[in-house]
Image: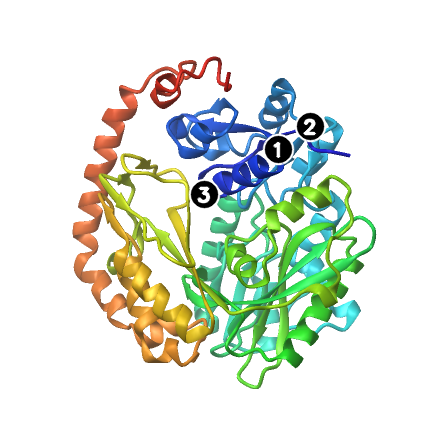
Amino acid sequence: MKIKKLLVANRGEIAVRVLRACRELGIATVAVFSEADREALHVQMADEAYPIGPAPATESYLVVDRLVQTARRAGADAVHPGYGFLSENPSFAEACAAAGLTFVGPPAAAMRRMGSKTAARQLARELGVPMVPGALEAVASDVEAARVAREIGYPVMLKAAMGGGGKGMRLVSREDDLTEALRAARAEAGAAFGDAAVYLERAVAEPRHVEIQILADAHDNVIHLGERECSIQRRHQKLIEECPSPLVDASLRARMGEAACRLARAAGYVNAGTVEFLVDAERNFYFLEMNTRLQVEHPVTEMVTGVDLVHEQLRIAAGAKLALTQSDVTWRGWAIECRINAEDPFAGWLPSPGTLTGLRAPSGPWVRDDSGAYEGYTVPRWYDTLISKLIVWGADREAACDRMARALAEYRVVGVRTTIPVLARVVAHPDFRAGRLSTGFLERVLPALRANESRVLPIALIAAVLAEYERGRHEAAAPPADTAPSAWRAAGIRGWSRP
C-alpha cells in the first residue's frame, strides 16, 4: 500500500514537520485551519488547505466528523494527527478507519489500552514492569481518594486518567489539601481531555523523567531508539529535553528499552510511541504512562540515531516492515531541545500571545529550528503557546550545551515575551552542566522566578486584557471564512490548492 495524499489534522510546528516529511516522500498534502489560523505557516505550505471552523479547538480541530469529511472531500487516503488535539483519541482513529482512511498512529484498541493511564498501569503490573505505588483505577469519590492517599502515604500525585502535557496533575502534601486539589485536577482534566477521571500515586521525591522511544510495525517487530531526559519542567510541562540522558548507562537503557518494548507488544501497539518512566537517585525506574503518538521532543532522538521518525510513521502506516532491527540502532553524540514558548516566565508563565514584529532564528552547524511561526505571524490566544523547538547536536554533552547556549543567544523574538531568558539561564547553570537534574530543578535552582510572580502579575494581567481588546478589534475586521488568506492570493494559488 502507498499513501498518496495525506491530511494533517493539526496546526503549528508539528503540522509543518509532517508536511515536510510528506514532501520528501512524494505524498500530496492537505492542511486544515481554524479562523484563527488563516495565515498560519502550515496553511501556506500544504498543497491544499480547508477551513474547518471557528478559532476554539472544540469547534474546529477537535470536531471529528468535520475532519473526516474534509479528508474525504479533499481525496486524501490518510490522516496524520500530529500531537495534542485528537492524536490520542481512539474514536478519531476509528472514524478514520470507517471512512477508509489510513490513520498514521496506533490501532484504536491499543490506544485505549495504553492511552488510559489506569489501564496502562494494570498492564504494566501484569507484565511485572516496576510501578510507583498507587491506584490502578480512577477514584470515584473524594472519600475513596482520601482512603487511597492514606494507604500509599503522603505526598501523593493526582493525575488525569487520560491525556498528558501536565494537565490534571496536582501534588498534594497533606490530607487537608486533597479535596480542593481533586476539584482543580478534575476540572482541568475534563476541560483538556473531555474526561474528568483522576487517579492517585505516591509522589517520588526529586525524580528524573526519562522516556523511551519505540517503533512497532504490524508484523510484530518492536524496537526502541533509546531514551530522552525530560526532567526540566514547569508545572509538569517539559521545557528542555535531551538524548541521551546523563543518568542512563548502557545497562539501564537496555532494561528500560526491553520493558518499553514488552509493554508495546502486549498492547498490540503499532507505529511510533513513547513509554515514560520516573527514575530515582538509585537508578530504579518506574512505569509512568505511555504516549500513544509522536512526542514534541522527538527531534533529539532523530539527531542522535539518524532515524526520521515521521518517515517511519508513514512507512509503518502504509504497511511496511521496520527497516531497522534493534541491533541496527546506534547512538552518536548528544542532542538538546529547548521549547520556545510565548510565555512570560517572570509572571507565572502567563501566555503572551501577539504579533511577532521581529523574528530571527539561530542557524549554523548542527542547529535545527522546528517552527510554525514567521515574522509578522500572530501567536493566537486559543492554542498552545509553542513558537518553535530549538534543537542542537554536539559530539558530546558539553559541546551540545555550548552550542545551545550560543543558539539561544542568537534567537531574537520581538512582540511577545518568551521562555528564552529562562532557558538560557538553565543551560548555563552549573547543576545543568553537571547533569544534576530532576523534575524539581526550576524550583531548586531558580527560586527567583516564583518570587517575581507576585511582583509583575498585575502588570501582566493588564497587558493581557489590553492584548485581548486589540485582538478583538482585529478579529472583528477579519475576512469571512470563505475567502483565501492573502499569502495564498499573493502566490497565485487558486481554490485552496496548488495549480
The residue furthest right is 219
Residue wearing tag 1: 26
Which one is in front, 371 or 307?
307
Q: Give the foreground label among 1 and 2.
A: 1
For residue 481, the mark is: none
- Earlier along the polypeptide chain: callout 3 or callout 1? 3
Residue type indicated by callout 1: Gly
Q: Secondary structure at mark 1?
A: loop
- Earlier along the polypeptide chain: callout 2 or callout 3? 3
- Badge 3 crowding class, 10 Å Cα cut-off, few under 14, some 14 to 19, many 20 or more, is many
- Badge 2 crowding class, 10 Å Cα cut-off, few under 14, some 14 to 19, many 20 or more, is some
Residue wearing tag 3: 13
Q: Are marks 3 and 1 in contact (CB under 8 Å)?
A: no
Q: Secondary structure at mark 2?
A: loop
- Earlier along the polypeptide chain: callout 1 or callout 2? 1
Q: In the rendering, at what x and y percent does residue 433 appear?
A: 38, 77
Q: In the rendering, at what x and y percent does residue 451 appear?
A: 23, 68
The answer to whether 245 is drawn above or below residue 115 in the figure is below
Task: State the separation of the CA atoms marked 2 and 3.
Answer: 22 Å
Which one is in front, 170 or 427?
427
Task: State the separation of the CA atoms marked 3 and 1.
Answer: 20 Å
Q: Are marks 2 and 3 in contact (CB under 8 Å)?
A: no
Residue type indicated by callout 2: Asp
Residue wearing tag 2: 77
Residue type indicated by callout 3: Glu
The residue furthest front is 365
Instruction: Tell me which corner region of the image, top left, top right, bottom left or bottom right, holds residue 483.
Output: top left
Q: Is residue 138 visible?
A: no
Which one is in front, 27 or 268?
27
Task: State the separation of the CA atoms marked 1 and 2.
Answer: 14 Å
Q: Secondary structure at mark 3?
A: helix
